[in-house]
């Protein structure tokens, strides 16, 4: 006489149900971003500066020569408010 016992651990009864299909979302490709700034005061202008990465824009804000020695306080304020990494030192 042969007796076979089938047991299942950790599975609910009826485990052989239909598979659930995963929903696929249609997502548009990421768009390239451009980061730019210009500061002008009554005495000077930084000029318009554009960058393809956030990191490059943050570095440029700290560059005194690139910004014509202009609007240091405004550049620092933008650096801090946009959460640029590191510390602002020009």
Image: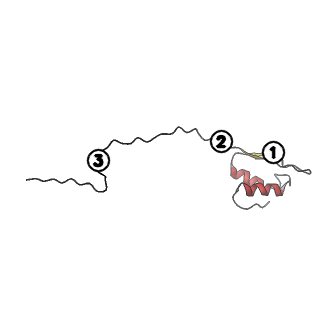
Can you give x and y, in whole percent of width and height, for residue 60 in the image?
Answer: 76, 52
Res. 62 in view = no
Q: Which sits in the foreground, 20 or 73? A: 20
Q: Nearer the viewer, mark 1 or mark 3?
A: 3
N-term-proximal mark, 3 vs 2: 3
**In terms of image quadrants, where is residue 31?**
top right
Give the residue pinned by disc 3: 14
Residue 11, how many percent across, how many down?
31, 53
Local crowd at mark 3 within 10 Å, few (<14), some, or many (≥20)?
few
Labels 1 and 3: the sequence-earlier one: 3
Kindly identify which residue carries mark 2. 32
Q: CA distance from mark 1 to mark 3?
A: 67 Å
* Mark nearer the N terminus (2 vs 1): 2
Residue 89 lies in quadrant: bottom right
Q: Secondary structure under badge 2?
A: loop
Place of residue 14 in the rendered image (x, y in percent of width and height, measured from the top left): 29, 47
User: Do residues under tags 1 and 3 come within 8 Å of each other at their CB atoms?
Assistant: no
Residue 84 has which mark?
none
Name the secondary structure under disc 1.
loop
Cβ atoms under marks 2 and 1 closer than 8 Å: no
Quadrant assignment for the C terminus:
bottom right
For label 1, the residue is 48
Residue drawn where x is 83% and y is 46% of the image: 47
Q: How is the image coloured?
A: secondary structure
Q: Could you say whether the residue bearing mark 3 is in a helix, strand or loop?
A: loop
Residue 10 higher or lower than 26, as above or below: below
The residue nearer to you, when weighing 60 against 73, is 73
**Horizontal placement of 54 versus 20: left or right?**
right
Residue 74 visible in the shown view? yes
Alpha carbon separation for disc pair 2 and 1: 19 Å
**In percent of the image, x 31 and y 43: which residue is there?**
17
């Amino acid at each position: 006489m042969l007796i076979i016992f089938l047991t299942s651990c950790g599975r609910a009864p009826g485990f052989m149900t239909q598979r659930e299909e995963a929903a696929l979302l249609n997502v548009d490709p990421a768009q390239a971003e451009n980061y730019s700034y210009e500061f002008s005061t009554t005495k000077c202008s930084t000029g318009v500066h554009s960058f393809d990465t956030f990191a490059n824009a943050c570095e440029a804000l700290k560059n005194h020569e690139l910004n014509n020695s202009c609007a240091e306080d405004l550049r620092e304020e933008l650096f801090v408010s946009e959460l640029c990494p590191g510390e602002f030192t020009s």
